Image (cartoon, rainbow, N blue to C red):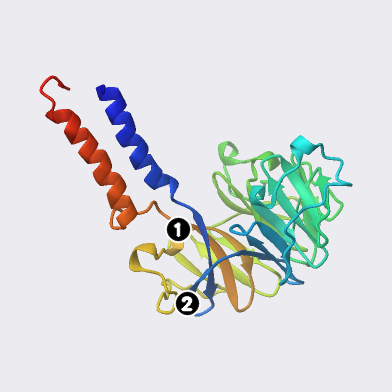
Amino acid sequence: MSVSKTIAIVSLLMTSLVANASVMSFRISSDGSVQLMSDRFYSDGSAYWRLDDLNNTFGVNSSANTSLNFSSSGLSIENQFSIADITDVTWARQTDAFVITDSGSFQISNNGSVQLMSDRFYSDGSAYWRLNDLNNTFGINSSANTSLNFTSSGISIQDQFSISDIINVTWARQSDAFVETNTGSYRISSDGSVQVVADRFYSDGSAYWRLDDQNNTFGINSSANRTLNFGSSGLSIEDQFSISDIQDVTWARQSDAFVLVQQSAVTVDSPSSQLLVFAGLALFAAYRRKPDNKI
């Protein structure tokens, strides 16, 4: 066996450890206590939708739609998707949920029927904002702001952004929307004026949660929990996370917030990981023991 093949095998074994990393869902109560959840939860306060990655179901409240109906969607068979393909839910309410997949934006009714959307929709239940990637517009309800006003933002010209740079909307309400770009977090008022915000804000309209990446705090309204309580979470120490590990907040309300965390790769402390690592090292050692094999 050649050096390149041996190293490739070891590399594949090590890569498989990283592949075991996954996004996990947790509920954080207002007192900081943490609970592991099997599903992801989304809501504008009127009703919640639960997405079960394991069983591939998605439905309103306690119901679960195991299949999607594309009969009136106008989508060709090759462009249809499964529940497992949903990467984000931008607005979830009693009647329907607006979702994003790699192929576009869709509206899923509570009976499972699917409709293709040209825009992305975000709302806390008080009003909706629509983001049109094609026409580069972002506005409240049926209006569309084609430009952003940075006059009072304090942002230098080189740091200003366009609507197409918005990668996520964390809170959309009647007066303004809180958005994220690759350069930071901003508040966009309904008249298009922009303001830099130090924190990320999430809400279903009942209360807001603020996540401060710099000071590693996460709390409801003006409070800030600097630590998380894993006492009753059932999580081992190595699976616990910090506030800075929170990737997204899917539902934030008065009593608690549901968050997504990217779990790190499986550690070598686990039996399966040890077997993979030891197998790779043994293979490489066996190769090195051969007299004619030099590196």
The residue indicated by pointer 2 is 33
Foreground residue among 84 and 26 = 84
For the point 66% across and 41% down, the residue is: 102
Residue 135 image point, x, y percent:
79, 37
Q: How many marks?
A: 2
Q: Is residue 16 above or below residue 49?
A: above
| Numbered circle sitting on residue 109 | none
Residue located farthest toward the right when viewing the structure as drawn:
72
Residue 185 image point, x, y percent:
58, 53
How crowded is the residue under tag 2: few (<14 C-alpha within 10 Å), some, or many (20+)?
Answer: some
Q: Earlier in the sequence, mark 1 or mark 2?
A: 2
Secondary-structure class at tag 1: helix
Tell me the quarter of the picture where residue 291 sits. top left
Quadrant of the image containing the N terminus: top left
The residue indicated by pointer 1 is 245
For the point 72% across and 58% down, the residue is: 66
Quadrant of the image containing the C terminus: top left
What's the amino acid at mark 1?
A: Asp
For the point 31% across and 25% down, the residue is: 5
Residue 79 image point, x, y percent:
75, 37
Tell me the quarter of the picture where residue 197 sits. bottom right
Would residue 94 be found to the left or right of residue 171 on screen? Answer: right
Q: Are marks 1 and 2 in contact (CB under 8 Å)?
A: no
What's the amino acid at mark 2?
A: Ser
Q: CA distance from mark 1 to mark 2?
A: 16 Å
Residue located farthest toward the left when viewing the structure as drawn:
291
Foreground residue among 104 and 15 = 15
Residue 82 image point, x, y percent:
70, 48
Secondary-structure class at tag 2: loop
